[in-house]
Image (spheres, helix red, strand yellow):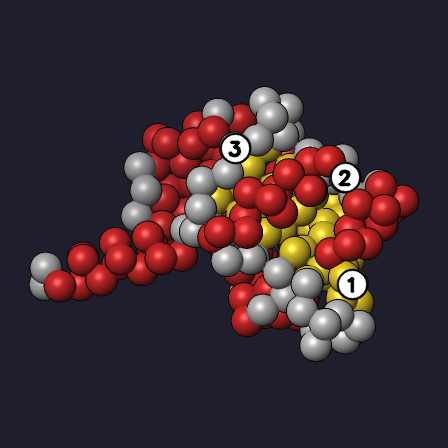
Amino acid sequence: MKSTLSRLPVYYCYVQNRQKEGDEYVSSSAMAESLSLNPVLVRKDLASVSTSPGRPKLGFRTEQLLQDMKTYLGYDNYNEAVLVGVGGLGKTLLQYPGFKNYGLDVVAGFDVDEKVVGQNVGGKPVYSVSKLEKLVKRLGVKLGVITVPGPQAQSVADLLVASGIKGIWNFAPAHIDLPADVAIRNENLAASLAALSKLVSKE
């Protein structure tokens, strides 16, 4: 199930592009070929989320498949999030408008730097971290994004959890210990770059 969940956003982008090209139907075999995936795997993944079977030689109706994937992934249920660490990466994420296409709305940023606090970044206010717990509880936000330096990541995570956050998207290069009922997704940019550089160096 987790593997399917990780592939579905890729399928979603592919089907979105097909819809923009005016394709009324999309086949699992064509999708598999374009994405260099096993066609049996793709067919199985799509069947697990589609509310209607694909048509022989045509495939799935593009509009319906997009809606089915959007519902399954929760893209049509908006989740509000707060971001802690309004440095270079944090500012970029605050200003990124594409999150709303995936059901995520980063409503505010938090930082300890007084030069940043009080600013408006991408239409989102930046508050002092000292106000985080009160604001998160008042707004009922359940998702937090961490973009602070590694040494500060654990303390920020602890503060988010204490505020009622139930899911953390962590961009800090650090391992974070969390309660069992709090979900986390780590994005290690340095590790990804190192892996990419290693692959390139082999050529």
Image point (18%, 57%), residue name: 199
Q: Which residue is mark 3?
A: 177
What amino acid is at disc 2? Ser
Earlier-in-chain disc, 1 versus 3: 1
Neighbourhood count class around disc 3 (C-alpha, 10 Å): few under 14, some 14–19, many 20 upward: few
Out of 26 and 178, give the one closest to the viewer. 178
Horizontally, residue 13 falls left or right of residue 173, namely: right
Disc 1, SS: strand
Neighbourhood count class around disc 2 (C-alpha, 10 Å): few under 14, some 14–19, many 20 upward: some
Q: Residue furthest right?
A: 138
Q: CA distance from mark 3 to mark 2?
A: 16 Å
Residue 173 percent across, percent down from the top left: 43, 51
Q: Which residue is mark 1?
A: 127
Q: CA distance from mark 2 to mark 1?
A: 15 Å
Q: CA distance from mark 1 to mark 3?
A: 25 Å
Residue 74 visible? The answer is no
Horizontally, residue 195 falls left or right of residue 24, namely: left
Image point (68%, 62%), residue name: 111
> For residue 71, what is the image quadrant?
top right
Neighbourhood count class around disc 1 (C-alpha, 10 Å): few under 14, some 14–19, many 20 upward: many
What amino acid is at disc 3? Asp
Residue 200 visible? The answer is yes
Q: Which residue is mark 2?
A: 163
Image point (50%, 38%), residue name: 176
What amino acid is at disc 1? Tyr
44 up-or-down from 14: above or below: above
Residue 128 percent across, percent down from the top left: 76, 61
Horizontally, residue 45 falls left or right of residue 77, namely: left
Horizontally, residue 103 falls left or right of residue 55, namely: right
Out of 196 and 76, give the one closest to the viewer. 196
Q: Residue furthest top?
A: 180
Residue 119 percent across, percent down from the top left: 77, 75
